[in-house]
């Protein structure tokens, strides 16, 4: 049974989300402020966190940033839950490491679908492991490990899947819509900036090796050896 931590200061909404998740077979823990949520995330290490942006005690963006920088908690996927839907807020959420972003008001069905999709990305079906080497980058698919030379590069689950998707299709152009479907597991209607933001973060983490990821203007991205 998957454990989901809900960090949301609106008690009624938090309890409604918890009720619907439990109906789907998840175990939930609810905290109503940022400080308590941070403590719960560190002590309980849930399988997924639903995190409100505006919280008393500690902002959701700060919680996300701290958790994603810690080796102990960086693997935990986070869905940002907020009433603010401006594009800049979505970009900031992804930049601090959020795996998905849901704007209030939302339907319970939409949230459940996103929870399932994020958990599926975080826990992919096991397949035969392989080593992919492209330029300086080595990808160990079985260990979910990326290295450049002797240095391990810490990637989120989504960043790893995005890199692997491009690497396995070396030299082939992938449209933003295709990447959304293959990496995120469903379509973000009109929200292709999600891909752009994650590509930017991925290139930054890869350093000079990030130049292997090429932009195909007006269409998408591809990975090719230099």
Image (cartoon, rainbow, N blue to C red):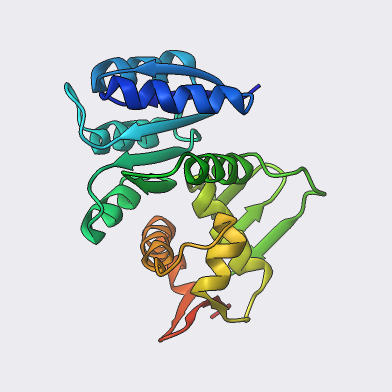
In the rendering, at what x and y percent does residue 38 appear?
32, 21
In the rendering, at what x and y percent does residue 48 appear?
50, 31
User: In the displayed structure, does residue 10 sit left or right of residue 139?
Assistant: left
Residue farthest right in this picture: 128
Q: Quarter-wise, where is residue 83 in the image?
A: top left
Q: Quarter-wise, where is residue 168 in the image?
A: bottom right
Tell me, yes or no, if residue 185 can be seen here: yes
* Residue depicted at 26% across the width and 34% down the height: 60
User: In the displayed structure, does residue 139 sit left or right of residue 149?
Assistant: right
User: In the displayed structure, does residue 13 sit left or right of residue 28?
Assistant: left
Query: How many discs appear?
Result: 0
In-front residue for pair 73/224 = 73
In the rendering, at what x and y percent does residue 185 appear?
60, 56
Q: In the image, is residue 211 above or below residue 54?
A: below
* Residue depicted at 46% across the width and 23% down the height: 18
In the rendering, at what x and y percent does residue 122 appear?
59, 41
* Residue depicted at 23% across the width and 52% down the height: 89
Tell me, yes or no, if residue 136 can be seen here: no
Q: Quadrant of the N terminus?
A: top right
In-front residue for pair 186/136 = 186
Residue farthest bottom in this picture: 217
In-front residue for pair 194/75 = 194
* Residue depicted at 31% across the width and 44% down the height: 104
Q: In the image, is residue 79 above or below residue 42?
A: below
């Amino acid at each position: 049974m998957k454990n989901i931590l809900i960090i949301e200061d609106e008690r009624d909404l938090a309890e409604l989300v918890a009720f619907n998740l439990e109906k789907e077979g998840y175990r939930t823990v609810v905290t109503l402020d940022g400080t308590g949520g941070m403590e719960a995330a560190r002590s309980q290490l849930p399988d997924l966190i639903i995190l409100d942006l505006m919280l008393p005690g500690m902002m959701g963006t700060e919680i996300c940033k701290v958790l994603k920088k810690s080796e102990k908690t960086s693997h935990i996927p986070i869905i940002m839950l907020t009433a603010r839907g401006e594009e800049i807020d979505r970009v900031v959420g992804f930049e601090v490491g959020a795996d998905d972003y849901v704007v209030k008001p939302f339907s319970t069905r939409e949230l459940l679908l996103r929870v399932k999709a994020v958990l599926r990305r975080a826990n992919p079906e096991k397949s035969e492991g392989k080593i992919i080497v492209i330029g300086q980058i080595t990808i160990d698919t079985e260990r979910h490990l990326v290295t450049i030379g002797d240095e391990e590069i810490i990637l989120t689950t989504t960043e790893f899947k995005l890199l692997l998707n491009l690497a396995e299709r070396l030299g082939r152009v992938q449209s933003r819509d295709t990447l959304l479907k293959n990496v995120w597991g469903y379509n973000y209607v009109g929200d292709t900036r999600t891909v752009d933001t994650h590509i930017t973060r991925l290139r930054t983490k890869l350093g000079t090796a990030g130049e292997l990821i090429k932009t195909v203007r007006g269409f998408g991205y591809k990975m090719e050896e230099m």
